[in-house]
Amino acid sequence: MSAIIEIEDYSWQYLDSSVPALNNISLSIEEGTFVGVIGPNGSGKTTLAYSMDGLIPGQYHGIKNGTVKILGREVEEYPQGELQQQVGVVFSDPESQFTAMTVEDELVFGMENLGMTIPEIRECLEWVLNLTNLGPLLNKPPYEISGGQKQQVALAAVLAMTPKVLILDEPTSMLDPLSRRRVFDVLDRLTREQKNTIIVIEHSLENLIPLADRMILLSDGQIVLDAGTRAFFQHVDLLLEKGISPPGAMRCFYELSRAGIYKGSLPLTVDEAYEKLTKLLVGRKRPANPQREGSQA
């Protein structure tokens, strides 16, 4: 597969800051890949998202070095509005993206701006409603629905414009566990049915890990770890050093490994941890004591 995003020797420093938000990073993302981006606060995650969407430098003032290319074209070379047809962004605060008075109008708004025909809009609307199960909310004001539903509407509105790249910047940070799960269920269907390139900046690792093909750790504006998901989470020492707390099941096996009780790769999910724990317990089961059995006979 070819690279849809190419970032080379890229740095960005806001005018009101004394240090770069991103410092000489290079990154290539292939089309159809699901990438998770994590890191402590202030590590440059949102700056990276804005750089790939053209919001930086389009709407922010600062000093830029290096290149950020989408589909082989530097983001600054795209005419206004054209890059956003290729890259859609969903922010942590969905209300900041709302412009209409009903959910239906919100979903249709972006498609109308793209100049899509009525049949095209109807087809896309039907597809995105099937994907997100938002049909019962079409006539409701987007400001009056639950937080999880608001985030699904924001996601659906971006998906309706069929971008090749979808970037979600901490989309579940304001949601309860059930609403968080529903957002990731939509992303799961999207990866299986559409093969979009998806980049998710997220703290909820339990939901992110099963979907991600690749993980990136940012710290102090630099990429300190970039690997396939399973290989990435074998570096728990580094994650803890950077303030990242792995999921409980993974942390449990990490501690077992440190204690010399377990040898092998760390589990990525609860189900995988259960299987490994079962095998571990069976393997450590004590054999029967013949002397004790004889004394009881």
Image (cartoon, rainbow, N blue to C red):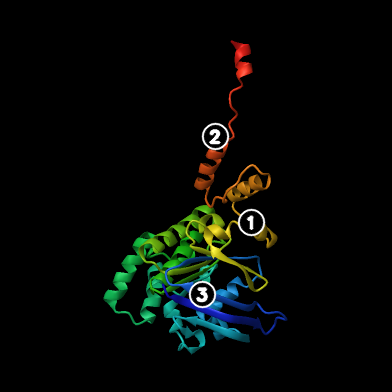
Q: Residue 69 in the image: state x and y as whole percent.
A: 50, 82
Location of residue 138 with respect to 285 vertically, above or below? below
In the rendered structure, which amino acid carries the disc numbered 2? Val
Locate the C terminus by quadrant. top right
Q: Residue furthest right?
A: 18
Could you tell me if the residues under marks 2 and 1 are in contact, i.e. CB atoms within 8 Å?
Answer: no
Q: Residue 163 in the image: state x and y as whole percent.
A: 41, 74
How would you rate the neighbour count of disc 1 (Cα within 10 Å): few for under 14, some for 14-19, many for 20 or more? some
Sooner in the amino-acid sequence: mark 1 or mark 3: 3
Residue hosting label 1: 236
Distance, label 2 to label 1, CA atoms, is 26 Å
Residue 88 in sight in this render: yes
Distance, label 3 to label 2, CA atoms, is 44 Å
Q: Residue 104 in the image: state x and y as whole percent.
A: 37, 69
Locate the N terminus by quadrant. bottom left
x 37%, y 66%: residue: 194
SS of the residue at dot 3?
A: strand
- Report the disc number at residue 282: 2
